[in-house]
Image (spheres, rainbow, N blue to C red):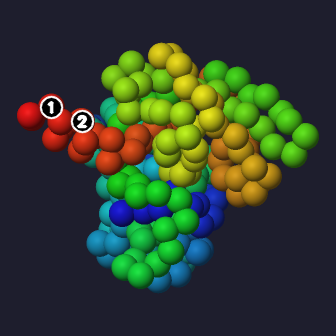
Amino acid sequence: MFTGIVEELGDVVSLENQGDNAIIAVRGPVVTSDARHGDSISVNGVCLTVIENVDGVFTADVMGETLRRSSLGALKKGSQVNLERAATVGSRLGGHLVQGHVDGVATILDRTPESEWEVLRFSLPESLSRYVVEKGSITVDGVSLTVMAVDDESFSVGLIPTTLKLTVLGSKSAGDPVNLEVDVIAKYVEKMLGSR
């Protein structure tokens, strides 16, 4: 589990496609400072398992399912990524409960600068629209955000200066893909109510 509070911007060292899967290497001195084989690190909202950690660079396997359901396959050497270590029991929950299981990929539709912050509007896949509500939580590229507005085809969030500066969302442009994870509680509620 994660909280959606990005710890650092990392850099992709390599992404080697191997048929239906890939191996990614990411430089991130903060998240690798205590990382061991088998630990989980969120990369742009995707939970990956550390297979090796050497000199501040960790490697992880990325299976075909993950490449198909996320934007990780579009990364290349030098791409910046949001990184977060798994939460520990007793740590503060600054964002919301994030699993690192991407539900879909959206694109940035537009960016509207305000005086000190920006509003970003994203496409909303039809299969996810029922889980997205105004003032609810959503994870975009691993960042826990609050939905400002939503309609059937899009949703908007506001980004404060810290988020603009310390996450990849500050440098992405209209048309860029992002990973979405909806609030898992909404999915469980839907399943429980549907079984009645």
Rendered residue at 79%/28% (across/down): 112
- The residue carrying pointer 2 sits among few (fewer than 14), some (14 to 19) or many (20 or more) residues within 10 Å by Cα, namely few
Instruction: Give the position of the N terminus as an image quadrant.
Output: bottom left
Q: Is residue 44 visible?
A: no
Instruction: Give the position of the C terminus as an image quadrant.
Output: top left
Amino acid under disc 2 = Glu
Rendered residue at 74%/28% (across/down): 111
In the picture provided, is 34 more to the left or to the right than 156?
left
Q: Position of residue 183 (x, y in %)?
A: 39, 45
Q: Position of residue 168 (x, y in %)?
A: 65, 47
Q: Is residue 46 visible?
A: yes
Instruction: Examine the image and state in which quarter residue 166 appears.
Output: bottom right
Going by the picture, which residue comes out furthest to the front?
196
Rendered residue at 9%/35% (across/down): 195
In the picture provided, is 73 more to the left or to the right than 191?
right
Residue 190: give its label: 2
Q: Secondary structure at mark 1?
A: helix
Instruction: Examine the image and state in which quarter residue 169 appears.
Output: top right
Could you say which is closer to the camera, residue 154 or residue 68? 154
Q: Secondary structure at mark 2?
A: helix
Q: Position of residue 2 (x, y in %)?
A: 42, 62
Q: CA distance from mark 1 to mark 2?
A: 6 Å
Amino acid under disc 1 = Gly
In this figure, which residue is indicated by the disc labeled 1? 194
Residue 172: give its label: none
**In the picture shown, does residue 128 fall above or below 126?**
below
Q: Are marks 1 and 2 in contact (CB under 8 Å)?
A: yes
